[in-house]
């Protein structure tokens, strides 16, 4: 498994920490095994992605997230919803949205990827703003 946060790559077979040397070795091996970079790009599709920060006082975050665990599944009835790391929605077309509280700033973050990312983000932000208002 190869997990990443922007520019912080973690390779669980080698340890649960950030390691640039291991990243270089793993990627070099992937390229060598594939016979170049081009074969690795074939299965990759690109969809528009957005990240939005919604103001939310730190003390309101637990109540906001509790409310979102109820309102988000209701707003996306055809989606698979996970609440393991915030509230994540996987839509049938492969689009997704993740709503989670920032651990360092007074925001709830909305991350989304979709061919119609603006509509998906707008809907998610509206749910977050409603939850924030209710928690105040």
Image (cartoon, rainbow, N blue to C red):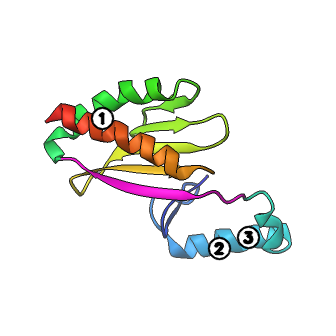
- Front residue of 94 and 38: 94
Rounded to the nearest whole Å, what is the CA distance between mark 1 and mark 2?
A: 39 Å
Pointers 2 and 3 in contact (CB under 8 A)? Answer: yes
In front: mark 1 or mark 2? 1
> Is residue 21 inside the magenta stretch?
no
In front: mark 3 or mark 1? 1
What SS does tag 2 mark? helix
Would residue 95 be visible to someone looking at this image? Answer: yes
What residue is at 38 percent from the left and 27 percent from the top?
71
The residue pinned by badge 1 equals 65
Crowd band around label 3 with a 10 angstrom C-alpha radius: few (<14), some (14–19), many (20+): few
The residue pinned by badge 3 equals 29
The residue pinned by badge 2 equals 25
- Front residue of 85 and 106: 106
Pointers 1 and 2 in contact (CB under 8 A)? Answer: no
Is residue 46 shown above or below 72? below
What residue is at 43 percent from the left and 57 percent from the top?
51
Crowd band around label 1 with a 10 angstrom C-alpha radius: few (<14), some (14–19), many (20+): many
Q: Which residues fall within the magenta stretch?
A: 45-56
What SS does tag 3 mark? helix
Does residue 97 appear left or right of residue 28 in this picture?
left
What residue is at 38 percent from the left and 55 percent from the top?
52
Q: Quadrant of residue 70?
A: top left
């Amino acid at each position: 498994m190869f997990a990443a946060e922007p520019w912080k790559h973690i390779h669980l077979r080698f340890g649960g920490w950030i390691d640039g040397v291991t990243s270089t070795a793993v990627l070099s091996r992937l390229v060598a095994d594939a016979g170049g970079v081009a074969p690795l790009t074939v299965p990759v599709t690109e969809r528009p992605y957005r990240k939005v920060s919604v103001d939310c006082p730190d003390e309101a975050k637990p109540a906001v997230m509790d409310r979102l665990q109820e309102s988000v599944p209701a707003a996306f009835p055809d989606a698979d919803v996970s609440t393991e790391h915030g509230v994540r929605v996987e839509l049938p077309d492969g689009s997704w949205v993740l709503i989670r509280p920032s651990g360092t700033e007074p925001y709830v973050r909305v991350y989304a990827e979709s061919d119609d990312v603006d509509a998906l983000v707008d809907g998610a932000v509206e749910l977050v703003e409603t939850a924030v208002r209710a928690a105040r």
